[in-house]
Amino acid sequence: MKLNEMKIFVFLGSMIVGIMVAMNLSFGLPSQAKVLNTTQYQVALIERSKLYNDITLLENQYKKEISELAQYNASNPSQEKIIDNMKSELSQNRRLLGLDEVKGKGAVITLNDASTNFSGTVEDDDILQWSRIVHNTDVLKLVNDLRATGAEALSINGQRIMSITEIYCWGPFLRINKVNIGAPFYISFIGNSNNIGKYLNSDEGYLTFLKYRGISINYDEKESVIIPAYIGSPKTQFMKEVKNN
């Protein structure tokens, strides 16, 4: 009888421990949450965003490759068909990289220094004079705004904007793709010119800021904008391929 009672107590005790474990109850001291400072919090947010982005890219790539594999299996393509598909993908990659000329709906933004023809007294102020000139930082910020709002291809005075393109001040010129370019600057892009124009001319848009400085601006929407190919051969010295096993 005592043996049966002991078994019952052991059984009940096991059940209670199991329930506590399932409810994530701790038998020790409660663990304290780690408090992050501002820098650690920002790093954690960036890392989390990067992981989410990597996961999304992998999922999209996986779905794309599964879809392509299903098409190959369903159609039993010939060698000629496979070669055509490879050429199509290669052509698309060249367009995205900027190695081929592209065209599409977009706009051309013309920037020029502010007019020096003022009525009345002209203030001889270095800051005022500086603010009336288009600088490389202005073009960089505008290019960033265009990319952020969905521009698919960009060029400045015929120079294709690539991931390796430099835009910096070179005396009275801007140096882009190792070419000196003077004002006016013609920034052409392919994208939703209506939505992009609304943002650039909004209170948060950079064109609005340039207008306050007196910079001459023209925003010309077009049904067909031609973005030339990058002139030259992009070369890498230190960048290497990462092979996935």
Image (tube, helix red, strand yellow):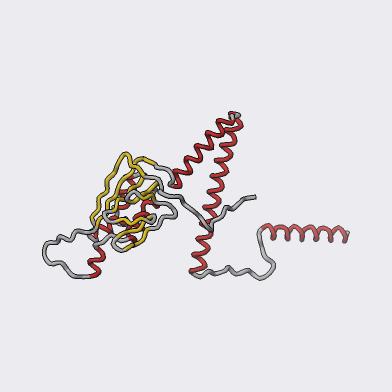
Q: Nearer the viewer, residue 31 or 74?
A: 74
Q: Quadrant of residue 25?
A: bottom right
Q: Position of residue 26 (x, y in %)?
A: 67, 65
With 19 as the anchor, is 173 left or right in this view? left
- Total numbered labels placed on residues in the image: 0
Q: In the rendered view, does 30 fall on the left or right side of 207? A: right
Q: Residue furthest left?
A: 120
Q: Is residue 196 above or below residue 67?
A: below
Task: Judge whether 35 appears above or below 233 on screen.
Answer: below
Q: Quadrant of residue 133?
A: bottom left
| Residue 104 point in image, percent of width and height | 36, 40
**Split into 4 quadrants, where in the image is the N terminus?**
bottom right
State the residue in front, 139 or 31.
139
- Say which residue appears at 26% left-offset and 64% top-offset: 131
Who is closer to the viewer here, 139 or 166? 166
Is 88 drawn above or below residue 166 in the view shown? above
Q: Is residue 192 above or below residue 78?
A: below
In the rendered view, does 66 fall on the left or right side of 150? right
Give residue 132's position: percent from left, percent from top: 24, 62
x, y percent for residue 52: 53, 53
Q: Residue at x 30, y 47 (%)?
A: 108
